[in-house]
Amino acid sequence: MRHRPIALDPADVQVKIRGGFRPADVRHAQETVAHLARLAHEPVLGARVKLGTAPEFGAGRRTAEAVLDVQGRLVWARASAASARGAVQLLGDRLRTRLLESTRDWENRRGRHHGQHPAGQASGERQVVRLLAAARAVPDEAVVDMEELAYDFLLFTEDATGQDSVVYRTGDGYRLTQLVPQADLPAPTCAAISVSPLPPPRLTVEEAIERLELTGFAFVFFADADTGTGRLVYRRADGDYGLFSTVHDG
């Protein structure tokens, strides 16, 4: 049974701003995200919004980005437009779609966990559950997001280079691995982050899962054999495999 929607107070939506934005634009973003949080399949534990400029899309272009923590699962959307209000409105449309897709995915998996299996699938066969990676961020921000969500690793798109990347905990801090390692990244400001000089292997999903099982690693970060985009596979607590992928949509 789906939970009863819980209202999220707009004031609880955290906002980070890069560039000049009117207070009305900030309130509009908070209210939009808080309203859409009612569509989540489980309680929303936190919501963050980033408002910024996007010179790569043209002078004066504005971006709006949102990340919702839906009971530990990230739901992310990003949009750009000629005005702040337009970017927030487009963000709302995309976030609505992502939340509805997430709900359908959750309900389908919930049905399987209650004994329903797709035709031809033997009971107990492991599934690959597809998930959306975290928002575009600098490594410091990714580490903060990872800690807030109590994760051991986090797949994201590095903001300065546009590289699909993963941060994860080590014995003495954190480590960053990128699809195409960059030696000239800005120095981290709030976390001890070392950078791996090695690129991840290029694998199919099946090969990545096989490597996960053979090595016993917590996760396997890899370049998709067909598309070359960054992906991460790990073993979920329910026994299935989680497959995180990055999404590039301007």
Image (spheres, rainbow, N blue to C red):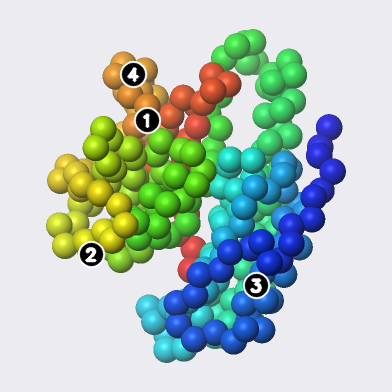
Circle 1 sits in a helix, a strand or a loop, which is it?
A: strand
Nearest to N terminus: mark 4 or mark 2: 2
Q: CA distance from mark 3 to mark 1?
A: 34 Å
- Residue 186: which numbered mark, if any? 2
Name which residue type carries label 3.
Ala
Task: Give me the residue at 50% from left, 47% from top.
Answer: 148
Circle 3 sits in a helix, a strand or a loop, which is it?
A: helix
Q: CA distance from mark 4 to mark 1?
A: 8 Å
Question: Foreground mark, 2 or 1?
Answer: 2
Q: Nearer the viewer, residue 187 or 180?
A: 187
Determine which residue is flagged by label 3: 29
Circle 4 sits in a helix, a strand or a loop, which is it?
A: loop
Q: CA distance from mark 2 to mark 1?
A: 26 Å
* Dot 3 and dot 4 residues touching (CB under 8 Å): no
Toward which corner of the image does residue 93 lie, by quadrant? bottom right
Name which residue type carries label 2.
Pro
Nearest to N terminus: mark 3 or mark 4: 3
Circle 2 sits in a helix, a strand or a loop, which is it?
A: loop
Q: CA distance from mark 3 to mark 2?
A: 29 Å
Determine which residue is flagged by label 1: 219
Determine which residue is flagged by label 4: 216
Toward which corner of the image does residue 196 lie, by quadrant? top left
Task: Give me the residue at 84% from left, 43% from top.
Answer: 4
Toward which corner of the image does residue 234 lie, by quadrant? top left
Mark 2 Cα-neighbour bin, 10 Å: few <14, some 14–19, many ≥20: few
Q: Nearer the viewer, residue 110 or 189?
A: 189
Name which residue type carries label 1.
Phe
